[in-house]
Amino acid sequence: MAREPIPAASPSVFLAGPSPDKSAPVPSWRPEALRVLKEQWTGYRPLTVLSPESRHGERADRYETQVDWETAARASATAILFWIPGDLRALPGMTTNVEFGLDVSTGRAVLGCPPDCPNPERNRYLIYVARRYGVPVCTTLTDTVAAALALVPAEDNPVADRGPFEGPSRVPPSCDAQHPSRT
């Protein structure tokens, strides 16, 4: 959880995406992501889930403290799961767009964008950029979690070694993992 110590040398997933704001309270998508991660994780070691939301909804004492923690957590994560609900009114995610731009070329990013979101046009550019960099693009949170877990090395995750999915990319069939050279 936000601003808690980041474990070293542990398989981990950072949950990147818009966070609810106290000024426009909406449910967070992260509890469902945690549930699906627990359900799908079959690794030999515990999976660390890094979330920018604090355990008890407490805000950082300084903006820089939060940004620095999130930057360090994304840098240390084995996989970075971006879930973009595409609701400009409730979860605008402007910071998320910048973070995706910083992380898209790391080889550790996965993008999830539901096609039935309130503002699907908002995700068009992110999806285009993801495809240019070979980042898996999924349409459900369940498949986005599966694609993120497929990035965890086989020594930590036996599913990544033999895969639950067909093909070399080891991502769910419903995810688009096109690379520019394959389009």
Image (tube, rainbow, N blue to C red):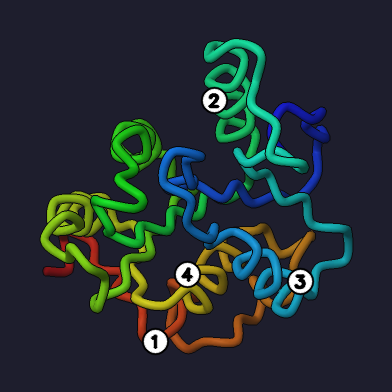
Q: Determine the residue positioned at 26% across, 71% down.
A: 117
Q: Secondary structure at mark 2?
A: helix
Q: Which of the two discs, 4 and 1, sits closer to the camera?
A: 4
Q: CA distance from mark 2 to mark 1?
A: 31 Å
Question: Which of the two discs, 4 and 3, labels the residue nearer the N terminus?
Answer: 3
The circle drawn on residue 38 is: 3
Quarter of the N terminus within the rendering: top right
Identify the residue shown where x is 28% and y is 58%.
Answer: 87
Would you say 84 lies left or right of 16 here? left
Q: Residue at x 78, y 60 (%)?
A: 156
Mark-to-mark CA distance, 3 and 2: 24 Å
- Which residue occupies 24% across, 51% down? 88
The disc at residue 173 is: 1
Q: Mark on residue 71?
A: 2
Q: Secondary structure at mark 3?
A: helix
Label 3: few (<14), some (14–19) or many (≥20) C-alpha neighbours in 10 Å: few
The crowd level at tag 4 (other Cα within 10 Å; few <14, some 14-19, many 20+) is many
- Going from the N terminus, do you reach mark 3 or mark 1 first? 3
